Image (cartoon, helix red, strand yellow):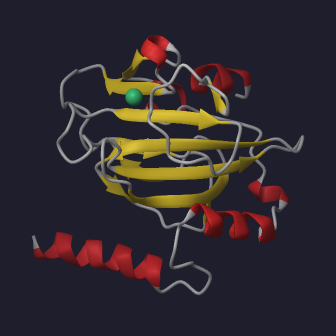
Amino acid sequence: MKTIIFLISLILLACTNSSDSYTTSSIQATSLVMDTLRVKNEHIADHFDFPVGKPNAKGYYNAQGFGKNAHLGDDWNGLGGGNSDLGDPIYAVANGFVTIAKDEHGGWGNVIRISHFLSNGIKVESLYAHCDTILICENRWVNRGDQIGTIGNAHGQYLAHLHFEMRDVIGMPIGGGYSRNTNGYIDPTAFIKAHR
Ligand SMILES: [Zn+2]
């Protein structure tokens, strides 16, 4: 237990002591950071993988795809069902910049949001929700396939799964996870399949 607390402290320290980290993660602050970002070649995201069972979602199934019941994302579950996937790794789907990594409370739990810059100038965002743990810091670049967190249950509200969204508008409000209005949202599985 002491080791776990020590490790958690280390992660928190690593996030708060960094020289270029920002103390707030409001949408406004995120926009400011995004405006001053220098996107180098190594940051470009032209190849996308699935966020679980890297790289092809092996061992997982999409229990509720984009558009089903007005769902705005995919729900990734382990083939074992129930909470068998609790604590499994979540991976960054592509190179990108972490804009949000925090507890959003409500039905969301711990949420990670990453902005991705394609070589054709298009920007998309990936969003990973209900996480059990967050293993990266805000305002940091990550690479495709980096483990960024673990699959969770939004503080015990659901059976463990990853609610995964992709958006073609960066920095929108967190939203509600379900809507018939899909403006700013894209089908994550279709997008990833088109950008392997
Ligand atoms: Zn969902």
Residue 86's place in the image compared with 34, above or below, is above
Name the quarter where the C terminus is drawn. Answer: top right
- Where does residue 140 sit, x and y in percent of width and height? 60, 67
Residue furthest top as drawn: 68
Name the quarter where the N terminus is drawn. Answer: bottom left
Residue at image coords 61%, 25%: 182
Residue at image coords 60%, 35%: 166
Q: Is residue 113 left or right of residue 183?
A: left
- Where does residue 113 sit, x and y in percent of width and height? 54, 51
Q: Quadrant of residue 34?
A: bottom right
Q: Quadrant of residue 154?
A: top left
Residue at image coords 58%, 60%: 99
Q: Is residue 50 left or right of residue 79?
A: right
Residue furthest right as drawn: 120
Q: Is residue 162 left or right of residue 40?
A: left
Residue furthest left as drawn: 1
- Where does residue 136 sit, x and y in percent of width and height? 46, 63
> Which quarter holds ligand 1?
top left
Which of the two residues, 32 or 96, is positioned nearer the viewer here?
A: 32
Count of numbered labels shown in the rendering: 0
Residue at image coords 67%, 29%: 183
- Where does residue 28 sit, x and y in percent of width and height? 64, 66
